[in-house]
């Protein structure tokens, strides 16, 4: 029956991904389908082991990406804490009321059980948010960093629960783990020497599963907590990001097993689906609360709205919490299925909403900006661009190359605009005049100073939608200079020219032309050198 498990899981994942949804919804569906064929979790012990490995590697990966300093920002730690507490205070009486009204899944549950459910429903999905942010290229934007910080805080709360739920008193040897930071130099030396291939992957698995999970479990602590802490210990190493990428597919594959085990707990009844629908109807209130809290921390309404929509769903960590509670007998196993269905439906809603959030903000931004508090957050305030002659929007490799070429030919009257803070810092260190700003943000254009001497705007953003939006905004501002843009796909050229771009360059065609130009110049130089050598030889003779 094992081949059927793989085939059904792949088929469900493909079908779901074809409609633009995260494949994990397909894996949950595959679990339900397998259950219909008579397969139960108890008959597949290996699947449960793989599921546990997936959760452990997920926490290790979170630790690898964790910048502890980001968690100390008020909008992150306080925003996550207040939102979780407020969610629990809201969910507990609502769930109690639904039980009083006669929903059988809630009748007979005590306040402690309702509190556990409220705790599980208070989380947002790390997997979904990271996927959306990566697809948009917004991981390093302010709203992306705030959303990821809040998610990590929620994950820490979940890990704390998982550790406490273990119920065993840790061994006295657990105190020796406080010496782990002293071993960092030795671990880093090993990290330096493992290279970039399979040894790097093996090193990561040993650190996550042996030094992290096994060592912590040996002294009576939760293995998932060990994986998270070891990940944090390695986060400062230059190769931590590479390690996270090398383990990515291991983690994703093992998490498939986790989502399958949820579906194998049983099929949802019509009442379960109805209750899941009620829970999903509450998600807009989660989004509204995130928006309100983040604007209270003086983030702009657009930043708060984008972050809030990224967090507007239920979480795989809520499933993990519910799974542990069901194993301990604290919650009926039926709730695993209900939360799984609610999670799936919330993803179905969140996917199109996250794609449309920019348009929604543009439509209602005047009302939303009334929620802002001043002075604005230091990272979210208006910027002054001065009066440059050339402006490059998007300072990736293409933008940086264009900047250097313009500087070599025309001097220093150039300004770069980049929305990723880390890139802004890199360019500033290289001596380039670059400021932080998001040209896909309507507020960026509304607060932009006029630059009367501006002659050329070069649009080098990686996403066609952002470049097209920038052209439209430049036209609205009455800009009379030249606009040039890059595209990745030839079909995007016409829309940019129709919008008002004067010249459009295909990224790959331009790269090919540049490569040929470089090669032919090298050949010309080589032939000239040969001619010079022949002339010298004649002179000597």
Image (cartoon, rainbow, N blue to C red):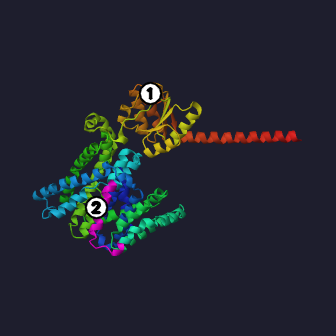
Q: Name the spot of residue 273 as percent of width and height, x first.
A: 21, 57
Q: Viewer-proximal residue, 9 or 128?
A: 128
Q: Which mark is residue 319?
A: 2
First along the sequence among labels 2 and 1: 2
Q: How many marks?
A: 2
Q: Viewer-proximal residue, 342 or 174?
A: 174
Q: Which mark is residue 186?
A: none
Q: Is residue 282 in the magenta section?
A: no
Q: Secondary structure at mark 2?
A: helix
Q: Quadrant of residue 123?
A: bottom left
Q: Name the spot of residue 373 as percent of width and height, x first.
A: 27, 39
Question: Residue placed at 21% from the left, 52% from the top?
Answer: 86
Q: Nearer the viewer, mark 2 or mark 1?
A: 1
Q: Is residue 254 visible?
A: no
Question: Residue placed at 12% from the left, 56% from the top?
Answer: 97
Q: Name the spot of residue 47 as percent of width and height, x first.
A: 35, 69
Q: Name the spot of residue 280 as percent of width and height, x first.
A: 23, 52
**Residue tagged 1:** 451
Span of residues in magenta: 151-174
Q: Secondary structure at mark 1?
A: loop
Please tell me whether the stretch drawn in magenta is mainly helix, strand or loop: helix
């Amino acid at each position: 029956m094992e081949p059927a498990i793989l085939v059904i899981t792949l088929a469900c994942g493909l079908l779901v991904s074809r409609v633009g949804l995260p494949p994990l919804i397909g894996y949950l569906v595959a679990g339900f389908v397998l259950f219909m064929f008579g397969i139960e979790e108890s008959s597949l012990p290996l699947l449960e082991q793989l599921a546990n490995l997936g959760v452990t590697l997920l926490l290790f990966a979170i630790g690898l990406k964790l910048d502890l300093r980001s968690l100390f920002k008020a909008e992150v730690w306080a925003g996550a804490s207040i939102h979780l507490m407020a969610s629990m205070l809201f969910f507990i009486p609502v769930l109690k009321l639904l039980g009083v009204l006669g929903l059988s899944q809630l009748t007979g549950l005590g306040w402690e059980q309702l509190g556990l459910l409220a705790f599980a429903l208070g989380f947002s999905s790390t997997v979904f948010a990271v996927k959306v942010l990566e697809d948009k290229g917004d991981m390093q934007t302010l709203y992306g960093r705030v959303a990821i910080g809040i998610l990590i805080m929620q994950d820490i709360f979940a890990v704390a629960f998982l550790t406490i739920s273990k119920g065993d008193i840790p061994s006295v040897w657990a105190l020796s783990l406080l010496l782990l930071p002293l071993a960092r130099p030795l671990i880093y030396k090993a990290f330096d020497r493992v290279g970039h291939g399979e040894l790097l992957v093996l090193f990561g698995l040993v650190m996550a599963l042996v030094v992290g999970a096994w060592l912590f479990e040996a002294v009576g602590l939760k293995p998932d907590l060990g994986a998270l802490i070891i990940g944090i210990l390695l986060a400062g190493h230059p190769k931590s990001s590479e390690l996270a990428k090398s383990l990515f597919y291991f983690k994703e594959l093992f998490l498939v097993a986790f989502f399958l085990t949820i579906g194998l707990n049983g099929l949802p009844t019509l009442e379960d689906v109805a209750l899941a629908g009620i829970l999903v109807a509450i998600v807009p209130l989660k989004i509204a609360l995130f928006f309100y809290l983040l604007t209270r921390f003086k983030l702009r309404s657009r930043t708060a709205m984008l972050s809030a929509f990224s967090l507007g769903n239920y979480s795989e960590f809520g499933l993990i919490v519910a799974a542990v509670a069901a194993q301990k007998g604290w919650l009926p196993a039926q709730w695993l299925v209900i939360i799984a269905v609610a999670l799936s439906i919330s993803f179905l809603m969140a996917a199109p909403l996250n794609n449309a959030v920019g348009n929604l903000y543009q439509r209602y931004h005047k009302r939303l900006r009334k929620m802002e508090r001043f002075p604005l957050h230091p990272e979210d305030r208006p910027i002054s661009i001065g009066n440059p002659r050339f402006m490059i929007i998007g300072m990736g490799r293409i933008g940086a190359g264009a900047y250097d070429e313009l500087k070599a030919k025309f001097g220093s009257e150039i300004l770069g605009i980049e929305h990723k803070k880390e890139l802004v810092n890199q360019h500033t260190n290289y001596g380039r005049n670059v400021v932080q700003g998001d040209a896909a943000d309507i507020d960026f254009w509304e607060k932009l100073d006029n630059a009367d001497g501006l002659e050329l705007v070069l649009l080098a953003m990686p996403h066609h939608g952002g470049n097209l939006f920038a052209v439209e905004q430049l036209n609205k501002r009455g800009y009379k200079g030249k606009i040039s843009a890059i595209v990745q796909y030839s079909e995007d050229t016409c829309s940019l020219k129709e919008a008002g771009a004067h010249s459009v360059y295909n990224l790959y065609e331009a790269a090919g032309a540049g490569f040929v130009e470089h090669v032919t110049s090298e050949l010309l130089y080589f032939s000239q050198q040969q001619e010079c050598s022949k002339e010298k030889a004649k002179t000597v003779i």
